Amino acid sequence: MIERIIIAGSGGQGVMLLGKVLAETAILEGKQVTYLPAYGPEVRGGTSHCMVTISNREIGSPYIGKADTLIILNNPSLERFKGKVKDGGLLILNSSLAKISALAKVRILQFPFTAIAIKLGNIKVANMAALGCYLAAKKIIKIKNVLKVFKFMAPAGNLKILEINQQALAEGVRLNHG
């Protein structure tokens, strides 16, 4: 098994955090992982992306030419990366900030992750709603282990952040289940 994921959005949307949560969870599960972050020149508000590879065998390079999955949080990232998903791959798109009608030979899941985050009371958790959608679609790592990583990564004593991230994750999973 090998899963190559490119996550992209604007600085401040939690692209790097989403990638780190995926990577840390895969490590917790004993999988091989690479994580390659790339920041745009402006950082917050500029574009950013990361590449995460999860495998049950050694990984040769952290660079991803063609991804199995793209998780795209805004339109500039969609324009930049839509050609980087392999045939038969998956595109998970934040329809609050980007739209696409079709992409040849690619499965597309479009949901309003930003609107969901706003409804939950924190626009910054759109990334975790997208993660929940991904986890429901691919089942590469276990949700219960993602929750363990949330607890490990959450700022000490800040249960509110932990709680809202868990809610956003659950909303994302629910999108894919009906």
Image: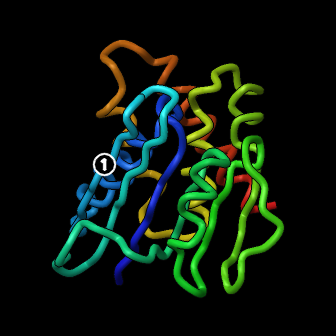
Q: Quadrant of the N terminus?
A: bottom left
Q: Specify how the rendered protein is coloured.
A: rainbow
| Residue 58 occupies quadrant | bottom left
Left or right, residue 120 beside residue 14 = right
Give the answer, above or below, for where 72 lies relative to 107. above
The amino acid pointed to by label 1 is: Pro
Q: Residue at 69%, 48% (x, y): give it.
A: 94
**Front residue of 151 and 67:** 67
Q: Residue at 65%, 54% (x, y): give it.
A: 173
Dot 1 alpha-carbon crowd within 10 angstroms: few under 14, some 14 to 19, many 20 or more:
some
Q: Residue at 21%, 65% (x, y): give it.
A: 30
Q: Position of residue 137 (x, y in %)?
A: 61, 68
Secondary structure at numbered mark 1: strand
Left or right, residue 96 beside residue 77 = right
Q: Position of residue 115 (x, y in %)?
A: 77, 34
Give the answer, above or below, for where 142 lies relative to 152. below
Residue position marked by numbered label 1 in the rendering: 37
Give the answer, above or below, for where 99 lies relative to 129. below
Left or right, residue 91 beside residue 46 = right
Q: Position of residue 55 (x, y in %)?
A: 29, 75
Q: Position of residue 103 (x, y in %)?
A: 72, 76
**Front residue of 133 and 145:** 133
Give the answer, above or below, for where 80 lies relative to 43. below
Q: Quadrant of the C terminus?
A: bottom right
Residue furthest toward the front?
Answer: 41
Q: How many marks?
A: 1
Residue furthest toward the top?
Answer: 157
| Residue 136 occupies quadrant | bottom right
